[in-house]
Image (cartoon, rainbow, N blue to C red):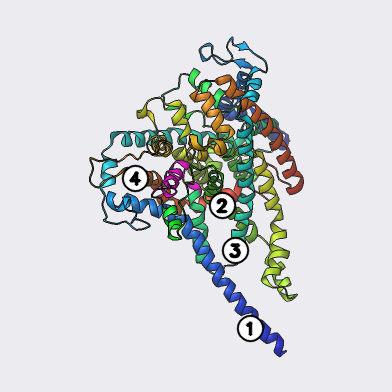
């Protein structure tokens, strides 16, 4: 009796040690996820001299907004944001509309829609296999979409993953609602618009967020379909001014400095642009996260 | 009587479903099936002026033969496999470990904050992240090398040294994506029946025993599923990431199939050869994807729809 009591105390002591280590470890991992962003923010807010001397780690030194005002003064930067906003509105709107509509017939059981399985396969095949970049590029070129916003809007319009996610949600809606509406003489368009869409708002929100973040982050389409810089969306613009130039410097060993500026260097200027590019996702992320988690557990992986 | 009338109406109503599917079908035909058919470029001496499906010169396996004779083809294939396999393995093990650790936390608030934070890098594009990493990993004034310098070690050129490039790419990819699978694993863990833990406790099982004998076996289905599904990506070593982190000095260890196709096809305009690489990739991926979905169906009872 006595031994078992003392043993319980002992395990709880080792348990407490474990909990402490575990907490420190997890806190460390979380910090590790934030550090790169903190570093880039600190650089963007510091002056050129402190950054060059290596004084800036995670806290800005000689706080200045000079890099940001330098970015804001660039016409190309604003142009690229305008292109991004345009593609998000057009591309996101189109894609979500198509998804919400397409999932409806596919959510019907076989006895109601006999061609359903054939259609689902038709879509799923495109999720698994694609022609790759060369034929797609040739197609877009032949359709005359080079340097047109539609090259960024039309090809990704059908997102099969989102359709599957939403059709699984539609299936949970009780069929009795539909039957009642059918008896009352409503057609499927009306049932879709008046019953399924209003009842699926949380799932539609998830799909919308996936689509918007996808469009905001996409850059490769801009790179290959747009010839002129003024047609680049923000991420493509950042790729060309931040990543490409850095990689080029890495190979040649030269360091580009903006000597005509007192406070802004190549590094602080790039850091400011990077941070602005990350900002929308960072601002919305805490509110969106629960929708994303719901989305993953809802449609993606059902164990 | 009423039932048959309803059934007749239902049958008639199938037309409306076809109409609803029309927009998506049209988009898919144009932007997915046409490029899929466009893979015939791989067997042509493709001239863009004559157009996709135009009167091109057919050269049979010529493009493939040309590829086999290129000195770096084997190298590119090896890089692709090495990078994607490491990403695959660590992309399961790291999230699994983190999910198990999070599960041991009692404080709900801390638990939720950790999940929120580690999931965040997943949503930032590789443009943003490689911009950050290029600065942090720079040999001259990057943060990582300042830290290494504290211990008196020589600076490491993470992105410009063939000994370090693959490791850097794999580590930063795990950093960006581990939050996603952690959330999936954690969701699986929270759905385990608490009664199992109760009875194990009565039987005298400690925390470690419970983890090994209850938690891991209960989420084995999810582990197998994620592992199997990631097999379909065997030839996707991460174009977005590598394209934005590599440079000619690390082509030897960093060039993968997708970056190779991009340079051949878009930059050098050797469309036929690039499409041949794409064709090869499609064939291999098809095999792996079919096998992985079959296995997912068999072992984890998973269906995509």
Q: CA distance from mark 1 to mark 4?
A: 56 Å
Q: CA distance from mark 3 to mark 2?
A: 14 Å
The spot of residue B88 in percent (x, y) is 63, 46
Q: CA distance from mark 1 to mark 3?
A: 23 Å
The spot of residue A61 in percent (x, y) is 29, 57
* Left or right: A262 as drawn, with respect to B77: left
**Mark 4 — on which chain does it sit?**
A
Which residue is under mark 4? A267
The spot of residue B82 in percent (x, y) is 63, 42
Q: Using the image, tell me which numbered label, if any, was put on residue B178.
A: 2
The secondary element bearing badge 3 is classed as: helix
**Residues behind callouts 1 and 3 on a single chain:** no
Q: Which residues are magenta?
A: B122-141
Q: Using the image, tell me which numbered label, if any, was put on residue A102.
A: none
Q: Is residue A113 visible?
A: no
Which residue is under mark 1? A9
Instruction: Check residue B131 for magenta coloring.
Output: yes
**Residues behind callouts 4 and 2 on a single chain:** no
Which quadrant is home to the N terminus of chain A? bottom right
Above or below: residue B117 compared with residue A167: below
Q: CA distance from mark 3 to mark 4?
A: 38 Å
Which residue is under mark 3? B101
Residue at the image position 32 percent from the left and 53 percent from the top: A53
């Amino acid at each position: 009796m006595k031994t078992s009591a003392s043993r319980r105390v002992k395990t709880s002591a080792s348990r407490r040690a474990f909990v402490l280590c575990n907490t420190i470890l997890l806190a460390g991992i979380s910090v590790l996820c934030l550090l790169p962003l903190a570093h880039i923010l600190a650089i963007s807010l510091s002056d050129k001299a402190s950054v060059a001397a290596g004084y800036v780690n995670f806290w800005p030194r000689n706080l200045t907004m000079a890099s940001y005002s330098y970015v804001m003064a660039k016409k190309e930067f604003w142009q690229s944001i305008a292109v991004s906003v345009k593609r998000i509105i057009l591309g996101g709107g189109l894609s979500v509309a198509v998804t919400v509509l397409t999932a409806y017939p596919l959510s019907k059981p076989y006895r109601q829609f006999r061609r359903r399985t054939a259609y689902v396969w038709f879509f799923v095949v495109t999720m698994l296999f694609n022609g790759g970049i060369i034929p797609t590029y040739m197609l877009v070129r032949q359709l005359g979409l080079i340097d047109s916003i539609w090259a960024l809007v039309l090809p990704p319009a059908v997102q099969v993953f989102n359709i599957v996610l939403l059709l699984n949600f539609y299936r949970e809606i009780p069929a009795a609602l539909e039957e009642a509406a059918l008896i009352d003489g409503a057609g499927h368009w009306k049932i879709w618009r008046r019953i399924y869409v209003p009842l699926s708002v949380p799932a539609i929100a998830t799909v919308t967020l996936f689509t918007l973040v996808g469009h905001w982050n996409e850059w490769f389409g801009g790179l290959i379909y747009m010839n002129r810089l003024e047609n680049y969306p923000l991420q493509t613009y950042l790729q060309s001014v931040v990543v490409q130039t850095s990689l080029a410097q890495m190979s040649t060993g030269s360091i580009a400095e903006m000597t005509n500026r007192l406070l802004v260097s190549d590094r602080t200027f790039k850091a400011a642009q990077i941070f602005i590019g990350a900002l929308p996702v960072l601002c919305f992320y805490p509110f969106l996260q629960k929708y994303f988690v719901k989305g993953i557990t809802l449609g993606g992986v059902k164990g | 009587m009423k039932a048959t009338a309803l059934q007749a109406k239902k049958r008639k109503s199938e037309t409306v479903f076809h109409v609803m599917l029309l927009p998506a079908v049209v988009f898919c035909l144009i932007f997915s099936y046409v490029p899929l058919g466009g893979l015939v470029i791989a067997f042509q001496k493709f001239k863009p002026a004559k157009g996709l499906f135009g009167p091109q010169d057919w050269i049979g396996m010529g493009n493939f033969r040309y590829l086999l004779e290129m000195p770096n083809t084997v190298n590119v294939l090896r890089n692709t496999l090495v990078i994607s396999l490491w990403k695959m393995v660590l992309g399961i093990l790291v999230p699994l470990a983190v999910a198990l650790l999070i599960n041991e936390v009692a404080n709900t608030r801390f638990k939720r904050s950790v999940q929120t934070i580690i999931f965040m890098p997943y949503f930032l594009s590789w443009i943003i992240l490689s911009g950050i990493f290029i600065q942090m990993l720079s040999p001259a004034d990057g943060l990582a090398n300042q830290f290494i310098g504290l211990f008196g070690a020589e600076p490491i050129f993470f992105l410009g040294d063939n000994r370090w490039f693959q490791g850097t790419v794999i580590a930063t990819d795990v950093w960006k994506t581990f939050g996603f699978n952690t959330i999936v694993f954690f969701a699986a863990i929270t759905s385990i029946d608490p009664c199992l833990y109760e009875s194990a406790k009565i039987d005298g099982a400690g925390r470690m025993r419970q983890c090994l004998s209850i938690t891991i076996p209960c989420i084995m289905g999810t582990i197998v599923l994620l592992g199997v599904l990631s097999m379909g990506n065997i030839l996707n070593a991460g174009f977005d990431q590598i394209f934005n982190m590599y440079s000619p000095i690390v082509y030897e260890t960093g060039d993968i199939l997708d970056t190779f196709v991009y340079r051949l096809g878009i930059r050098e305009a050797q469309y036929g050869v690039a499409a041949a690489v794409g064709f090869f990739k499609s064939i291999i991926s098809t095999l792996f994807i079919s096998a992985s979905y079959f296995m997912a169906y068999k072992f984890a009872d998973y269906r995509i729809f």
